């Protein structure tokens, strides 16, 4: 049974853990991607790359207002039309207004987590506009009627047999599990979409302030087709995607490629600085850039600026032991899963009630911090968000009562001594008593010593005294 993204968190997790096919696909894919990343990073001075990439991102966030003003000025000078959107509603309004003004009927999209974040596809379809994802993975999940389950590999949760069935059912192709034949079928379908679409939409990996340039990173070439073939092109960029210079963008391109797919660089690095000019052989007649906030300023205001450093490489997702067991759909209706998703989702939505479980969807092992190419301390951010859950009292009544009882016992010497004495005797019973019974299904509780430390210390002190007296 597929994971129901609308179900409660615990239900989603149980559904994921019960799906052996899903877990096999996740294990195989994340192991492959993590192995490729490790090999790619071993070929270079990985520490230096992380230091330099982190410095580039921190400079951009620290100088965000100035860089955004410079970016807007240069985009306009290049002939682009720039729109600012405070939230998803404003961004969608801009896109739909452009579509209506140009009588758009068909849209092709390059892979974009930002457009997933604002629900662009649903908004276009509700307005009677056909939209087609052109990234192969996104195309597959669109055919399946599912959201992506990974930042880099949207279809990571599917086996090739599943994809073959989707193509047979939706594209009327002969059943085959040959990847080359499946790719050829998708290519034939998408070629007509590229040629017929009036509007192309992409996200943005990096926006270069010094030159007013939008950078889109892909491995399939679909990004370049989306940005150059339709007569109108819209790029939707989170405001945190701005960087100072082309050199900074190229450095981050290398860091993202090695950490995402284990490549020295991705196959395509498309740069678009404006609409078609006289003498150009291709390019859109109009280019619009939407600079989206949608909670990003709030992230910075509340002291979570490190989360804005993310370059969406997915390395933390691939290494996370929790994600590797449950997959992206168990994180709910969010384009961001894994450790970074557990941080971004509650922060971007600013709805700690809707995402109260996600900060706890982590073992805090620190592997995500160790592989992050810009050195985001994700465990610290997750712990901070857990404290917010407790402070806002959105944890369950049982959790709050247990923590209050624990805090009371720790502050009072007499109750503390009683609990310590009882622990040694009651330890074997914890597997029978709720809620510890549930907790111990997947954990081993250390055995309590029969004698507490204080008693041992006093015995040693008495022994020393007797020795001295003798």
Image (cartoon, rainbow, N blue to C red):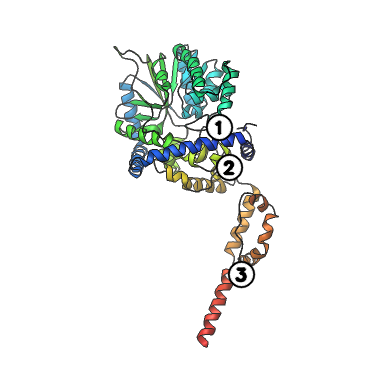
Of residues 404 and 426, the one drawn nearer to the viewer in this rendering: 426
Residue 308 spot, x, y in % from top left: 42, 38
On residue 437, which mark appears?
none
In the rendered view of the protein, which quadrant contains the N terminus? Answer: top right
Earlier in the chain: of badge 1 and badge 3, it is: 1
Helix, strand or loop at label 1? It is loop
Residue 410 spot, x, y in % from top left: 58, 62
Residue 332 spot, x, y in % from top left: 58, 35
On residue 451, which mark appears?
3
Of residues 325 and 388, the one drawn nearer to the viewer in this rendering: 325
Residue 249 spot, x, y in % from top left: 33, 32
- Which residue extends farthest bottom? 470
- Give the alpha-carbon distance from disc 1 to disc 3, as whole Å: 50 Å
Q: Residue at x 44, y 18 (%)?
A: 200
Mark 1 or 3, which is nearer the eye?
Answer: 1
On residue 157, which mark appears?
1
Earlier in the chain: of badge 1 and badge 2, it is: 1
Callouts 3 and 2 close, C-beta under 8 Å: no
Helix, strand or loop at label 3? It is loop
Earlier in the chain: of badge 3 and badge 2, it is: 2
Asked if residue 377 can be seen in this view, the reply is no
**Crowd band around label 2 with a 10 angstrom C-alpha radius: few (<14), some (14–19), many (20+):** many
Helix, strand or loop at label 2? It is loop
- Residue identified by numbered label 2: 357
**Crowd band around label 3 with a 10 angstrom C-alpha radius: few (<14), some (14–19), many (20+):** few
Asked if residue 112 can be seen in this view, the reply is yes
Q: Residue at x 51, y 45 (%)?
A: 385
- The relative height of residue 62 versus residue 79 in the rendered view (above or below) is below
Of residues 319 and 385, the one drawn nearer to the viewer in this rendering: 319
Q: In the rendered picture of this protein, how many numbered marks are placed on residues?
A: 3
Of residues 206 and 290, the one drawn nearer to the viewer in this rendering: 206
């Amino acid at each position: 049974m597929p994971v129901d993204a609308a179900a409660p968190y615990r239900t989603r997790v149980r559904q994921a853990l019960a799906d052996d096919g899903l877990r096999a696909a996740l294990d195989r894919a994340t192991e492959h991607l993590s192995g490729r990343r490790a090999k790619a990073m071993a070929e270079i001075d990985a520490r230096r790359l992380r230091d330099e990439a982190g410095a580039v991102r921190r400079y951009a966030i620290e100088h965000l207002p100035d860089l955004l003003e410079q970016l807007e000025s240069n985009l306009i000078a290049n002939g682009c039309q720039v729109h600012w959107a405070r939230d998803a509603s404003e961004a969608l309004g801009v896109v739909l207004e452009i579509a209506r003004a140009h009588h758009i009927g068909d849209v092709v999209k390059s892979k974009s987590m930002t457009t997933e974040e604002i629900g662009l596809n649903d908004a276009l379809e509700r307005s009677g506009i056909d939209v087609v994802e052109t990234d192969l993975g996104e195309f597959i999940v669109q055919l399946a009627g599912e959201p992506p389950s990974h930042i880099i590999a949207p279809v990571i949760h599917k086996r090739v047999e599943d994809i073959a069935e989707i193509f047979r059912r939706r594209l009327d192709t002969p059943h085959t599990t040959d990847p080359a034949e499946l790719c050829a079928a998708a290519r034939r379908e998408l070629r007509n979409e590229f040629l017929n679409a009036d509007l192309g939409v992409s996200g943005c990996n990096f926006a270069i302030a010094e030159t007013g340039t939008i950078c889109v990173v892909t491995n399939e070439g679909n990004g370049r087709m989306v940005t150059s073939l339709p007569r109108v092109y819209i790029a939707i960029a989170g405001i945190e995607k701005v960087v100072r210079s082309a050199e900074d963008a190229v450095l981050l391109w290398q860091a993202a490629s090695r950490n995402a797919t284990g490549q020295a660089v991705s196959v395509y690095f498309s740069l678009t600085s404006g609409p078609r000019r006289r003498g150009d052989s291709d390019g859109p007649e109009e280019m619009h850039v939407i600079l989206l906030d949608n909670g990003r300023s709030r992230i910075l205001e509340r002291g979570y600026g490190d989360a804005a450093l993310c370059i969406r490489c997915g390395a933390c997702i691939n290494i996370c032991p929790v994600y590797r067991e449950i997959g992206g759909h168990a994180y709910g209706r969010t384009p961001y899963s894994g450790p970074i998703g557990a941080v971004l989702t509650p922060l971007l939505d600013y709805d700690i009630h809707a995402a109260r479980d996600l900060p706890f969807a982590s073992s805090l092992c620190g592997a995500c911090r160790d592989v992050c190419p810009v050195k985001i301390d994700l465990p610290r951010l997750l712990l901070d968000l857990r404290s917010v859950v407790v402070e806002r009292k959105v944890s369950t009544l049982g959790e709050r009562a247990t923590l209050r009882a624990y805090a009371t016992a720790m502050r009072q010497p007499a109750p503390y001594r009683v609990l310590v004495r009882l622990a040694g005797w009651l330890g074997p019973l914890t597997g029978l008593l709720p809620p510890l019974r549930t907790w111990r299904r997947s954990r081993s509780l250390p055995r309590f010593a029969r004698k507490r430390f204080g008693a041992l210390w006093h015995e040693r002190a008495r022994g020393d005294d007797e020795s001295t007296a003798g």
